C-alpha cells in the first residue's frame, strides 16, 4: 500500500514541477498538460521499458488522470504556489524521495539484482526532471554541484540494503524515502554538496 502511494505521489509531484515550469514560460493549458505529463510519467516509463515489464500508465490510466488533475491545479493556482519558498525544488525533492524507493522496489519485485534495483531507483527518480529541463531549455539539476542524483542514489540504496537484510517493506520504504528527502532538503536549505572532481596536472 505504501509503495502504491509513493508511486502516485512521485507522479503527482513531478507532474507539478512540469506544470510550474510551463506556467513560468506562460504556455497554454495543453502545453502545460504536456509538460506535467511527460515529467510525471517519464522516470517510471524509462524504468518499465528497461525492466521489460508493462508500462505502468498503459496498464493503469489513473496515472494519466493524476497528471491531468495536477495540471488543472497548477493552471489555476500557479501564482499562489510560486509564492511559497522554492516550490519547484521542494516538489522535486519529494518526487526524488518517492520515486527512488518505488523504482528500486519494482526492480526487486521482478527479480533483478540489487545493483540493478539501485540504478532503476536513480533512473526513475531523475529522468522525468531531465526530460522537463531539456524540453524547457534549462540547465538540469543533474549537472549542478548540489546533492541531487546522490539523494536518489541514497534513497534507492538504503531501501535495497534494508530490504536485503529482511526489514519490513513498509519500514524500509519509509526510512529510505525520509533519508533521500533529508539529503535533498539539506542541499536546498544549506547548499550541501559532495566533493567534485578536481582536474589534476599532467604527470
Image (cartoon, helix red, strand yellow):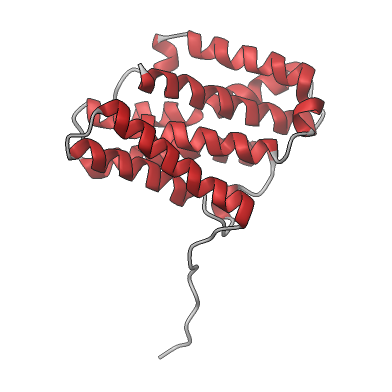
Relative image position of residue 43 (x, y in whole percent): 46, 32
Residue 42 visible here: yes
Q: Residue furthest bottom?
A: 203
* Foreground residue among 55 and 149: 149
Residue 55 visible here: no
Q: Residue at x 73, y 29 (%)?
A: 22
Where is residue 111, by image quadrant?
top left
Q: Residue at x 77, y 25 (%)?
A: 78
Relative image position of residue 93 (x, y in whole percent): 55, 39
Q: Is residue 106 left or right of residue 144?
A: left
- Classify 199 as above or below 30: below
Please tell me how many numbered marks the rendered image carries. 0
* Foreground residue among 136 and 152: 152
Q: Is residue 32 left or right of residue 157?
A: right
Relative image position of residue 193 (x, y in whole percent): 53, 60
Q: Quadrant of the C terminus?
A: bottom left
Q: Residue at x 42, y 43 (%)?
A: 179
* Foreground residue among 53 and 169: 169
Q: Residue at x 32, y 44 (%)?
A: 158
- Classify 65 as above or below 14: above
* Foreground residue among 139 and 4: 4
Relative image position of residue 48 (x, y in whole percent): 36, 26
Q: Quadrant of the N terminus?
A: top left
Where is residue 133, by image quadrant?
top right
- Classify 132 as above or below 193: above
- Classify 5 as above or below 93: above
Amino acid at each position: 500500500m505504501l509503495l502504491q502511494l509513493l508511486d502516485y505521489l512521485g507522479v503527482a509531484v513531478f507532474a507539478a514541477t512540469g506544470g510550474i515550469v510551463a506556467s513560468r514560460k506562460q504556455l497554454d493549458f495543453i502545453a502545460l498538460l504536456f509538460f506535467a505529463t511527460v515529467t510525471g510519467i517519464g522516470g517510471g516509463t524509462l524504468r518499465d521499458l528497461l525492466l521489460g515489464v508493462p508500462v505502468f500508465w498503459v496498464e493503469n490510466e489513473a496515472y494519466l488522470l493524476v497528471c491531468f488533475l495536477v495540471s488543472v491545479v497548477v493552471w489555476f493556482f500557479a501564482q499562489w504556489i510560486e509564492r511559497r519558498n522554492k516550490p519547484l525544488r521542494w516538489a522535486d525533492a519529494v518526487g526524488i524521495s518517492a520515486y527512488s524507493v518505488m523504482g528500486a522496489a519494482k526492480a526487486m519485485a521482478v527479480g533483478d539484482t540489487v545493483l540493478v534495483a539501485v540504478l532503476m531507483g536513480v533512473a526513475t527518480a531523475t529522468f522525468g526532471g531531465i526530460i522537463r529541463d531539456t524540453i524547457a531549455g534549462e540547465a538540469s539539476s543533474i549537472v549542478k554541484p548540489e546533492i541531487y542524483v546522490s539523494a536518489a542514489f541514497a534513497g534507492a540504496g538504503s531501501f535495497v540494503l534494508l530490504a536485503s537484510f529482511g526489514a519490513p517493506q513498509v519500514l524500509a520504504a519509509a526510512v529510505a524515502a525520509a533519508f533521500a528527502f533529508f539529503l535533498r532538503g539539506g542541499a536546498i536549505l544549506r547548499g550541501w554538496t559532495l566533493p567534485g572532481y578536481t582536474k589534476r596536472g599532467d604527470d
